[in-house]
Amino acid sequence: MRKIYLLILMSFFLHNCKENTDLKPNYSDFENDLEQRNLYGKVKELEQYKAIFQNGEDTRDPLLNLREKFTEFGSLNKAEYFDNYGKITQIDHFYYDDNHFLKKSISENNLANQKTVQLISYDSIKKTTTRNITFNDSLNYKFISTFDSNDLIAKQIKIEAKDTVVRSYEYKFNDDNKKTLEKEFEEGKELSIGTYKYDKENQLIEYSNKEEWMELLTQTEWKNNRIFKQTDYTISADLKKYLDRITEYDRQFNPVNIKIYENSELNRELEYDYEFDQFGNWIKRTVSMKEHFANSNKFIPIYIESREIKYWE
């Protein structure tokens, strides 16, 4: 319920060893933040560094750009974000109750000079979640969300000062209880329509999110019950279909090749080369780019990302 709510809330305002082929990623219905980040094992802390190539040869010294700490039950406890010079830009703290539900979060954004405090309470009998959000101790919002029998959000009330906005949601399912349709309404007006299509194994092969002036479409290809390719399109109001991106993945759902298009023409292409630790998490990846718009015929290394990972066990 908490994961689904976060998505809805956002709609209102990214030791070397071979790849562990026995591991299988989770693509939806995440149990915790580790699964959502495609991390394996009981990760305690992660630091991520980035070193940029200069002229395709030597790299600058790696700079820390992300630090995350996790609880023993796999939820994010603290996150620190850094700019391209290694200076911290934002710190997020997360606090949980005895049932591992998020009860409070504090976010301090140094760039915007803004502190955001969020207090969350749950009512399991009424199946509601209430969030009170304060910006810099003054601007307040309240979100009251009600969930249906499938633990999907049915209604959300946003209260700001004297203004109240109500959003509601409708769903349809197939015979295997897989969601095939979701509609979002605001004050009775339809805002968006999401449609889901599945193959014979009930694996999601197409998702569409359609709003008034635009439709975003993602087609997913599977091999041996794993996602290996996703293709993204934008469909404009005049029903013209534009190819945006093609992403290919390894068995652990790490991107290995991304083709980026402009007006359906191949613009640039990224390749990822990985090194993994004994748990199956990547600890180093080299990213190279081919500039098709400049008629380049080879990949040039552009940066190296590395991760230092500590585990609870």
Image: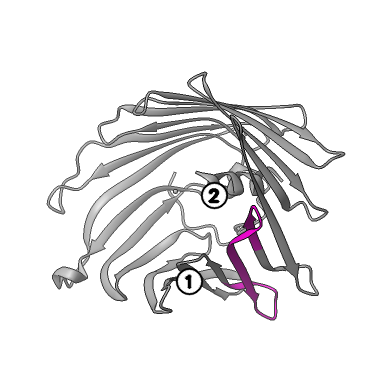
Residue lying farthest to the top in this orientation: 137
Q: In this view, does 293 lie to the left or right of 17?
A: left
Above-or-below relation of 70 to 176 = above
Can residue 279 be seen in the rendering of this structure?
no
Which element carries disc 1, helix, strand or loop?
Answer: strand
**Magenta highlight range:** 183-206
Which dot marks residue 11? 2
Q: Is the magenta stretch mostly helix, strand or loop?
A: strand
Disc 2 crowd, CA 10 A, few/some/many (<14, 14-19, 20+): few
Looking at the picture, how far across and down is residue 124, in whole percent? Answer: 83, 38
Looking at the picture, how far across and down is residue 203, in whole percent? Answer: 65, 72
Task: Choose between 288 and 175: the one closer to the eye.
Answer: 175
Which dot marks residue 229? 1
Looking at the picture, how far across and down is residue 238, in whole percent? Answer: 40, 78
Task: Choose between 75 and 273: the one closer to the eye.
Answer: 75
At 71% from the left and 49% from the top, the residue drawn is: 155
